[in-house]
Amino acid sequence: MASTIKTGGTVPVSGQYRPVGSKTEYTFVQGKRVPPTNNGATKFTLVDKTKHKGGK
């Protein structure tokens, strides 16, 4: 399940992402861009994929 995305990239899967070297998690939505950070380009790793109930 290891999905990694860089700052400015498009989120491939909705879920909780953690920046490399950090303990903080952020929620990113599929299809949206990863926002800029104060530290410049940052890699985020998918920690927990969003779970959907069968909706329409």
Image: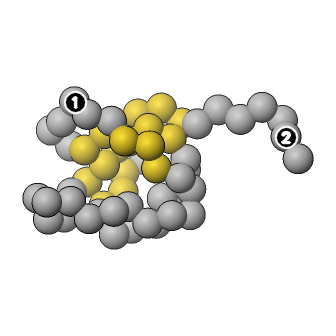
Label 2 CA crowd tier, 10 Å (few <14, some 14–19, many 20+): few
Q: Quadrant of residue 45?
A: top left
Q: Quadrant of residue 23?
A: top left
Disc 2 on helix, strand or loop? loop
Q: Quick check: 37 above or below 56?
A: below
- Please name the residue that numbered disc 2 is placed on: 55
Q: Quadrant of residue 25?
A: top left
Q: Residue at x 15, y 38 (%)?
A: 21
Q: Residue at x 33, y 62 (%)?
A: 35
Q: Position of residue 55 (x, y in %)?
A: 85, 40
The answer to whether residue 28 is left or right of residue 17 is: right
Disc 1 on helix, strand or loop? loop
Q: Which mark is residue 52?
A: none
Q: Residue at x 88, y 47 (%)?
A: 56
Q: Which badge, 1 or 2, is on the more N-terminal residue?
A: 1
Q: Position of residue 44 (x, y in %)?
A: 31, 49
- Please name the residue that numbered disc 1 is placed on: 23
The answer to whether residue 2 is left or right of residue 21 is: right
Residue type, label 1: Lys
Give the colouring mode of the picture. Answer: secondary structure
Farthest bottom residue in view: 8
- Residue 2 visible, this angle: no
- Residue 10 visible, this angle: yes
